Image (cartoon, helix red, strand yellow):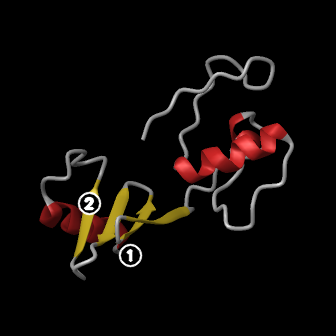
Amino acid sequence: MPNILSFPGKLPEGTTYGGISGTMDFYATAAAIAGVQRPAHLVGEDLMPLLSGKAVTNPDKAHFWNTHGSQIIRWKQWRLVKFRDGSWRLYDIVGDPDKWSEEAARQRFFNAIQL
């Protein structure tokens, strides 16, 4: 999900970050900016080192989360969802951003990972 951030004096103007982030990262980042220890149950990563250029993105990092009874994995351009009814779907969110063709995504995924 695209986001726009402004933090004068902390984030360089016009900088873009191409990594993956989620809502949980904003809570962790806000806690770090505020200088408070985040609660133990809070998942997520402080994005300030990445946004400020003090760290680099790991292109192989995956995000995992649960929402409304579904479990989701996001890795690179792929999103794998296990729905609460037990069914699975694989989406190519770059090749098919509207997530219409799960079969086409599956074929592109297997083509991409073949050695």
Q: Is residue 75 left or right of residue 112?
A: right
Q: Amino acid at mark 1?
A: Leu
- Residue visible at 13% across and 53% down in the picture: 100
- Residue visible at 35% across and 71% down in the picture: 69
Q: Amino acid at mark 2?
A: Tyr
Question: Which numbered disc, 1 or 2, marks the residue closer to the eye?
Answer: 2
- Res. 91 mark: 2
Which is nearer the eye, 60 or 64?
64
Q: Is residue 67 left or right of residue 58?
A: left
Q: Can residue 20 be seen by looking at this rendering?
A: no
Which is nearer the eye, 63 or 23?
23
x and y, in percent, of residue 89 in the image: 23, 70
x and y, in percent, of residue 57 in the image: 64, 49
Tell me the CA gap for discs 1 and 2. 21 Å
- Res. 97 mark: none
Relative to 96, residue 115 above or below: below
- Res. 115 mark: 1
Relative to 100, residue 82 above or below: below
- Residue visible at 64% across and 62% down in the picture: 43
Relative to 49, residue 63 above or below: below
Q: Can residue 2 be seen by looking at this rendering?
A: yes
